[in-house]
Image: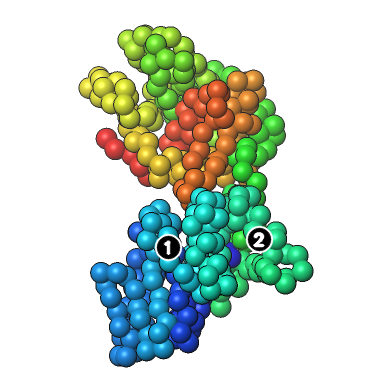
């Protein structure tokens, strides 16, 4: 099901109806934080049913029929082991590791010949995709359903789905809003169509932005400076440095900044970046710090993904850059997107480009 389709509401209705008729129900969320809306749903329902007993400490609701709903989390599944359920509802199921389903939840259904509802928005072609495919068979033991976000009858949700079509990449729209199973793997599309640029000299009066991804002199990574023309949204220069002392890196950056009309600099602040950024700022250079977190990285990488998706950017036809872009991956781990180069490869050029593109679009996640 697509985002905001109403999956949690559906799961709550299924859980309440079954428990009211005497069933033992496990309603499972990926994490404790994810389970809070489930528990609020349970508490709201209890207000309407005075004969129902709510045990907050155990996070469960008991019905006069003998039925029960318990709220559990996949990241702390110990409480489910040894239990027996008639129904298990796995909310946001694609975010679970496959062993939670096979080793923890499935055995709890054996004693009562129970059933499971696996509900969620696709996250690549993982174990959830395999179960979905099984349900597309004869429908005797297992059946699958699919619906986009636009199937929600609420006008605000339908409007959000329409806006998403214009604001996110094709891949993200298909997965998150159309509920299609999209392959994990290379994230950026149209790299060949966008990698047609050549290095160009600065133009008087033109604005430029420089993205900076630092690397230690003794490490195997590269420090990369990427220069973008803000008007043409075009990459005009890339400088890669390996095994270079920080003083030399700073000197090369100052020279590049002066050469390209003293434009803005967007530099990573994490780890070794902090003292380098602060040193440049103390010298009066217009350096904006970028703090890389899981959330901020997701923000800038998806923005760059959208730029390639729409062919809004032109980058250098550089073999190293093209290789990094073509191999850059998104993988979902426990429901969280993770972006990186494959093992043994680099992503320094991609990150430097993402910082610069973020500067053009004046996105968030800056500190000064």
From the top left corner, tell me how far across and down residue 6 is, in percent: 51, 72
154 over 203 or under it: above or below: below
Q: Residue at x 47, y 80 (%)?
A: 23
- For label 2, the residue is 132
Could you give the CA–CA distance between mark 1 and mark 2, rounded to whole angstroms? 27 Å
Residue 82: image tag: 1
Which is nearer the N-term, disc 1 or disc 2? 1
Q: Residue at x 46, y 18 (%)?
A: 221
Determine crowd level at label 1: few under 14, some 14-19, many 20+ residues with C-alpha closer than 10 A: few
From the top left corner, tell me how far across and down residue 331 is, in percent: 54, 42
Query: What number of labels is visible?
Result: 2
Q: Foreground: 290 or 8? A: 8
Q: How is the image coloured?
A: rainbow
Dot 1 falls on a residue whose secondary structure is loop
Pair 1/2: label in front: 1
Residue 267: image tag: none
Dot 2 falls on a residue whose secondary structure is helix
128 over 202 or under it: above or below: below
Q: Foreground: 279 or 62? A: 62
Q: Residue at x 57, y 37 (%)?
A: 329
Q: Residue furthest front?
A: 111
Q: Residue at x 65, y 29 (%)?
A: 195
Q: Image quarter for residue 273?
A: top left
From the top left corner, tell me how far across and down residue 67 is, in percent: 42, 82
184 over 275 or under it: above or below: below
Q: Residue furthest left?
A: 282
Q: Image quarter for residue 16?
A: bottom left
Work out whether residue 191 can be spotted: yes
Image-based side of 115 in relation to 337, left or right: right
Q: Foreground: 60 or 199? A: 60
From the top left corner, tell me how far across and down residue 191 is, in percent: 66, 34
Q: Quadrant of the C terminus?
A: top left
């Amino acid at each position: 099901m697509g985002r905001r389709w109403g999956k949690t509401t559906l799961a709550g209705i299924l859980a309440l109806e079954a428990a009211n008729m005497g069933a033992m129900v496990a309603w499972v969320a990926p994490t404790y934080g994810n389970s809070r809306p489930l528990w609020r749903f349970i508490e709201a329902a209890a207000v309407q049913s005075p004969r129902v007993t709510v045990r907050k400490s155990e996070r469960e609701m008991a019905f006069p029929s003998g039925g029960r709903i318990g709220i559990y989390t996949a990241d702390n599944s110990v409480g489910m082991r040894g239990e027996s359920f008639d129904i298990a509802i796995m909310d946001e199921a694609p975010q679970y590791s496959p062993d939670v389903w096979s080793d923890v939840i499935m055995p709890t259904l054996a004693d009562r010949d129970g059933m499971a509802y696996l509900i969620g928005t696709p996250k690549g072609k993982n174990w959830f995709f395999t179960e979905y495919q099984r349900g597309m068979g004869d429908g005797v033991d297992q059946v699958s359903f699919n619906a986009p976000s636009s199937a929600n009858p609420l006008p605000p949700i339908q409007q959000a789905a329409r806006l998403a079509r214009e604001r996110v990449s094709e891949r993200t729209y298909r997965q998150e809003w159309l509920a299609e199973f999209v392959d994990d793997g290379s994230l950026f599309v149209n790299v060949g169509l966008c990698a047609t640029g050549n290095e160009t000299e600065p133009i008087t009066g033109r604005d430029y932005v420089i993205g900076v991804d630092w690397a230690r002199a003794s490490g195997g990574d590269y420090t990369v400076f990427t220069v973008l023309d803000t008007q043409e949204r075009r990459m005009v220069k890339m400088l890669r440095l390996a095994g270079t002392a920080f003083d030399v890196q700073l000197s090369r950056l100052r020279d590049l900044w002066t050469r390209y009309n003293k434009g803005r600099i967007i530099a990573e602040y994490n780890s070794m970046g902090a003292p380098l950024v602060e040193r440049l700022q103390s010298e009066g250079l217009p350096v904006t710090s970028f703090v890389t977190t899981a959330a901020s990285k997701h923000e800038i990488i998806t923005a760059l993904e959208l730029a390639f998706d729409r062919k809004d950017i032109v980058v250098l036809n550089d073999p190293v850059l093209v290789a990094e872009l073509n191999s850059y991956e998104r993988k979902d781990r426990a429901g969280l997107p993770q972006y990186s180069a494959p093992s043994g490869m680099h992503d320094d050029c991609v990150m430097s480009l993402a910082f610069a593109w973020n500067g053009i679009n004046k996105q968030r996640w800056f500190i000064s």
